[in-house]
Amino acid sequence: MPDLRLTNTLSRQQETLVPAERTPDGRPRLRFYSCGPTVYSYAHIGNFRTFLTADLVVRVAEALDWSVAYVSNITDVGHLTNDDVADADGEDKMAKALRSKEGEAFPTVYDLARHYATALEDDWKRLNLRQPWVRPRATEHVTEQIEAVERLIASGHAYATDEAVYFSVTSFPAYGRLSGNTLDTPLLEAVRDVVVDEGKRDPRDFALWKRDDHHLMQWYAPFGPDRDFKGFPGWHIECSAMARKYLGDTLDLHAGGEDLIFPHHECEIAQSEALTGKPFARHWLHTRFLQVEGEKMSKSKGNFYTVRDLVEPTEAAAALGFPRGVDPLALRYALLSGQYKKPLNFTRKALHDSAKAVERYRSARTLAEAAAQANAPGDSGLSTALNDAYTRTLAALCDDLNTPAAFAAALDGVKAIEAARDGMNGAAAQAALDWLDRTNALLGVVVSDYALPSAAPAEPTGPPAEVLALVDERAAARAAKDFAASDRLRDALAALGWTVQDTPAGQEIVPLG
């Protein structure tokens, strides 16, 4: 078995991931925590790119015959709107969502959280992700968070004011080693000085517990001189408390999106190591951002996609050339097509290419199933070719989750099955089916592990109505010999991702790419 090597954000270099513990039968046991979403809305495809990185780690570890204890949380309290600074200000994202137009459908913030947490699990299954061993919720682990804060106060790493309990950054000299925002970084103080609290000792200190009479979720905690501090936990303390409860004091691996490096993960390290005196995580893995057609994904630009925006028959899916929705496994393929440590450009062409690739896997499976029943004369070299393809696929994933190389190696296996179409006996067909199962266990793009409603066809059934109308206009312009108008309409079609070819039989509409 190859070593699993991953880039460690903490050391800034590629390292072999070696679990510290073994099971009673001698297998490595991976203790793995990956930050989940704040459930105030539907998770978008950028979120799922990060979740898919964690999913790949789990799948590769299983292929290496490791035991995997995988925890991914749900944040349903404490995540404030100004979360790009360590001591975030603003309002709770859950409460803000409740006041939105979509939030009007929910009686309470707890109902809103329940709805979007369920939606997350639905989308998780659609994209064929492994289920975490535990999916803890912050609101169900407030006791553990309060106990952690109490111990930090008792040890001198935290202090209470009238408004909050703060972690004292100066009490932890190693602060900043993950992100580079060390104690003497001038920018650090500038971006942190946002919370107005006369009792706060240092602008860089961050809140472990906050008091806010208007907050919708509140608990009593034994902090302060009266030991009656009604409030809510800070965002950072929840992950430290839940990770420690389920995985122990030191994790083998902690993962998340690159936006979590600072402040979230930096603060997790400080409070966790101050609490236990032990390293919090030996290896850190961060997934880079996703762009759409070379631009930052945003609602204002009209390029913001949730999973259900694409896999359901929506206007967004139709505009991309999938009027019946994108095959969920094709979306999974597209989101995994770039290596996690590089930004991913999510494009219409990549989505169509991914749909074609997934369809080739399905066709190969259909071919092998038919040959297994027919027991036709065979191709003795197929098994060897498929074993080689699997070995190279696993090796690529063990090389820092190099998904482009892994997909290329796996595609060689599909080609080998296609080449054996006319000469596949029962043994070769079974080898093909076994290879497809093993490859699916690694990549998850052949067939879903879940019983879901029938998937949308991989290929679009036709252009949307807007495109058809422009094609008709172009035909009329050409009939009137208004070629300037015809060219303008062709450009308009290209902007929508389509082109038109003039043939003796008339205009043929073709998706770009």
Image (cartoon, rainbow, N blue to C red):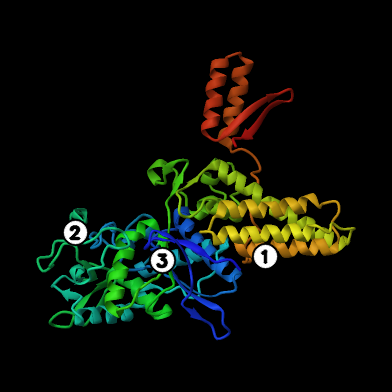
**In the foreground, 512 or 418:** 418
In which image quadrant can residue 262 be found?
bottom left
- Tag 3: Cα neighbours inside 10 Å, few (<14), some, or many (≥20)? many
Give the residue drawn at x 35%, y 67%: 109
The residues bearing labels 1 and 3 have C-alpha atoms spaced at a distance of 28 Å
**In the foreground, 361 or 76:** 361
- Tag 1: Cα neighbours inside 10 Å, few (<14), some, or many (≥20)? some
Instruction: Indicate which disc, 1 or 2, sits on the residue closer to the N terminus.
Output: 2
143 up-or-down from 354: above or below: below
Residue 470 in picture, x, y percent from top left:
57, 28
Q: Nearer the viewer, mark 1 or mark 2?
A: 2
The residues bearing labels 3 and 2 have C-alpha atoms spaced at a distance of 28 Å
Residue 66 in picture, x, y percent from top left:
56, 74
Give the residue drawn at x 62%, y 18%: 478
Quarter of the figure that contains the N terminus: bottom right
The residue beneath circle 1 is 438
The residue beneath circle 2 is 184
The residue beneath circle 3 is 35
Left or right placement of residue 248 versus residue 119 in this view: left
Give the residue drawn at x 64%, y 56%: 455
Left or right placement of residue 459 versus residue 14 in this view: right
Give the residue drawn at x 40%, y 46%: 299
Left or right placement of residue 307 versus residue 101 in this view: right
Q: Which mark is residue 271?
A: none
